[in-house]
Every structure is written in C-alpha cells, then in structure tokens.
Image: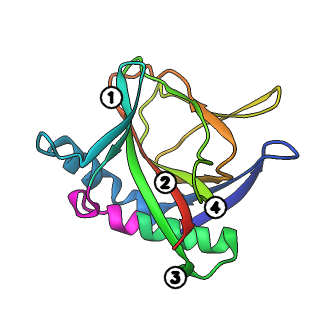
Amino acid sequence: MTQSETVEVSDSIRIRRYFCKTCMMHNASIVDAWNHLPEGGCIRKTHFFHGRYENLYVNRDALPGLEYILDQALHFAVEILCRPRDSLKIGFWLNVMREGEITSRHSHDDDDELLSGVYYIQVPEAFGVFRCFNRDEIVSITPNAGTFLFFDPGIEHEVTRHCAKQPRISLGMNIGPA
C-alpha cells in the first residue's frame, strides 16, 4: 500500500511525500547488510563536512532490498515528472548520521537533475529533522521510516543535529534524463 500527499511548503516549494509499506518491509535487511558490510564496502565517499562523509556510495547489490526501493523511487518519479520510465535514470547514496552529526545546507542542482529525493530506512527517536528553505522561510518535515520525499533539485535543504545513539539511515537520490 502506498499513500501519497503533496506538502505545500510555500508558493515556490512543493514536496511530494509517499509512504511505501512494501518498501518498509526491506528496511531491516538493508540495515543488517549495512552493519555487516566489510571494511571498504563503500565504492566511494564524498562531501566531507563536520568530520564525516555525508554521501556513502555502495553497489546496488550490496544491500538486499535496495533495488526494490530504487525501482519504487523511479515509479514515483515517472508520476511526478510525467515522463516515460525509460527516459529517466537514478543516482543514489546512503546518508548515515550518528549521534551529534548534521547534514549541511545544500541543493542538488549541480548537473542535469530533474528531481531529488530521500527515502528513510531507519529513523530512531531524537533524529535530525529535514529542513528546507525559501528566502526567509524555513519549513521542517519530520522523517519516518518507509517514507519518500521528492523535491525540486534547486531547493536548499539540511538535516538538523541527530541526537540518538542509533544511527539515522536514509537513501539520497537524484533522478535525471537517461
């Protein structure tokens, strides 16, 4: 079952939120595989800010269930962008926040992105909140496991300080032309 809603943030910011129950069924196996990924299991790490790499890249087959979630993300992107599936491609990375960490304010409009998104895999209590910005306006969105957020790549956003002992794990993604 999938539930969808558009979150009106302001006149110029719209965020689409989807809850995907079938995706959520894969979260535990993704977390388990991540916790058992051998040293060097990441293909690469980028965006070193505040003492950590914000983007962790892994092979699609390294985390069981990841392929299903990416497939669902493309399904939602087709709906949002009104484009054929074979005209789109998806890039992705993991964001693992440990206690005390933040994700810096940024946007994703560096290349040919048409849509950006995040899928929440593990969200413990005392998590960091997704915040987006429009001029002087700041809007906070509470993350929940099993939820996708999709937004325009030009929207500046950040994640506030994560205060839980258990890591917050999310899947960042950009969707662009194939």
Give the mark nearest the N terminus, 4 or 2: 4
Residue 83: x percent and y percent?
65, 78
Residue 124, picture quadrant: top left
Bin the neighbour count of mark 1 within 10 Å (Cα to Cα): few under 14, some 14-19, many 20 and up. Answer: some
Q: Which residue in the structure is indicated by mark 1?
A: 166
Whether residue 130 is visible, yes or no, is: no
- Nearer to us in this view, 27 or 46: 46
User: Residue under circle 4?
Assistant: 114
Q: Disc 2 or 3, which lies upstream in sequence?
A: 3
- What amino acid is labelled 2 in the image? Met
Residue 77 coordinates in the image, percent (x, y):
60, 68
Q: Is residue 58 above or below residue 129?
A: below
Label 4 vs label 3: CA separation? Answer: 14 Å
Visible residue check, residue 28: yes
Quadrant housing residue 17? bottom right
Q: Secondary structure at mark 1?
A: loop
**The residue under label 4 is which amino acid type?**
Leu
Q: Find disc 3 in the rendering and name its residue.
A: 86
| SS for dot 2 | strand
From this viewpoint, which residue is outermost toward the right?
11
**Towards the viewer: 133 or 140:** 133
In the image, the segment drawn in magenta is 59-69
Residue 117 lies within the magenta run: no
Q: Which residue is mark 2?
A: 173
Q: Nearer the viewer, mark 2 or mark 1?
A: 2
> Is there a contact, CB below 8 Å, between mark 1 and mark 3?
no
Residue count near mark 4 (Cα–Cα under 10 Å), binned few <14, some 14–19, many ≥20: some
| Disc on the earlier residue, 1 or 3 | 3
Residue shown at the point (61%, 40%) measured from the top left: 107
**Dot 3 alpha-carbon crowd within 10 angstroms: few under 14, some 14 to 19, many 20 or more:** few
In this rendering, the answer to whether 49 lies above or below 88 is above
Q: Would you say 130 lies left or right of 16 here?
A: left
